[in-house]
């Protein structure tokens, strides 16, 4: 299945959230420069811990603050939220091409989101010097995406190069 051949539908950021969450994310964005964004994001998380809007906002906030462990926690949680909506295995290592190829076309948007989120898990682990885990994530993505639509091949090469330089 070509991961670029799909009609985008059910985009996570178009999904409604619990009352107040959208406003808290907006407040966080307004207060980012002042250093007061985190509290609003955490309030949003407590209101809607399964909201991909909140999890993505937390990931971005922590990533740009260079708090990579926290960014990884938010990203891993997002992966866990997406996974059951597309009936993927609990452990990403058990994911096979058949899970993607046999999925209904209307779930391709969520599948892409899952794969890009998994790529983010690999990237954050690479930044945290968890190179073996990062390599495993990128190898899995490359094995699932023969046309490199997700863009994991270059990251895999980077991790391997980094490991050989050590």
Image: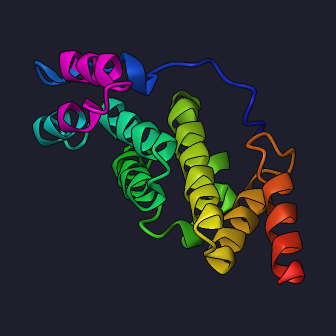
Q: Determine whether 54 is above or below 23 in the image.
A: below
Residue 33 at x, y percent in the picture? 38, 24
Viewer-side residue, 91 vs 67: 67
Is residue 148 rendered to the left or right of residue 59?
A: right
Q: From the image, which quarter does the C terminus lie in?
A: bottom right
Residue 144 at x, y percent in the picture? 73, 56
Residue in the picture at 79% in, 68% down? 159
Is residue 34 rendered to the left or right of residue 161?
A: left
Q: Determine whether 120 is above or below 94 in the image.
A: above
Viewer-side residue, 65 vs 132: 65
Viewer-side residue, 121 vs 40: 40
Is residue 137 rendered to the left or right of residue 20?
A: right
Is residue 149 rendered to the left or right of residue 19?
A: right
Could one spot residue 12 in this view of the protein?
yes
- Asked whether 8 falls inside the magenta stretch, the response is no
- Asked whether 23 falls inside the magenta stretch, the response is yes
Please give the range of residues in magenta: 22-40
- The rendered magenta stretch, by its main secondary structure, is classed as helix
Q: Which colour scheme appears in the figure?
A: rainbow
Q: Determine whether 86 is above or below 166 in the image.
A: above
Residue 157 at x, y percent in the picture? 87, 63
View extreme (front): residue:
34
């Amino acid at each position: 299945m070509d991961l670029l051949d799909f009609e985008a539908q059910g985009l996570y950021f178009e999904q409604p959230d619990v009352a107040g969450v959208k406003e808290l994310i907006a407040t966080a964005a307004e207060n980012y420069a002042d250093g007061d964004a985190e509290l609003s994001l955490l309030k949003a998380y407590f209101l809607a811990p399964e909201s991909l809007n909140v999890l993505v906002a937390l990931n971005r906030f922590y990533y740009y603050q260079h708090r990579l462990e926290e960014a990884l926690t938010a990203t891993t949680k997002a992966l866990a939220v997406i996974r059951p909506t597309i009936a993927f295995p609990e452990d990403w290592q058990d994911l096979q091409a058949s899970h993607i190829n046999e999925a209904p076309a209307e779930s391709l948007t969520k599948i892409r989101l899952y794969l890009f989120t998994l790529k983010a898990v690999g990237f954050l682990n690479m930044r945290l010097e968890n190179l073996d885990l990062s390599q495993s994530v990128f190898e899995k993505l490359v094995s699932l995406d023969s046309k490199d639509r997700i863009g994991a091949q270059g990251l895999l090469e980077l991790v391997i190069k980094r490991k050989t330089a050590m």
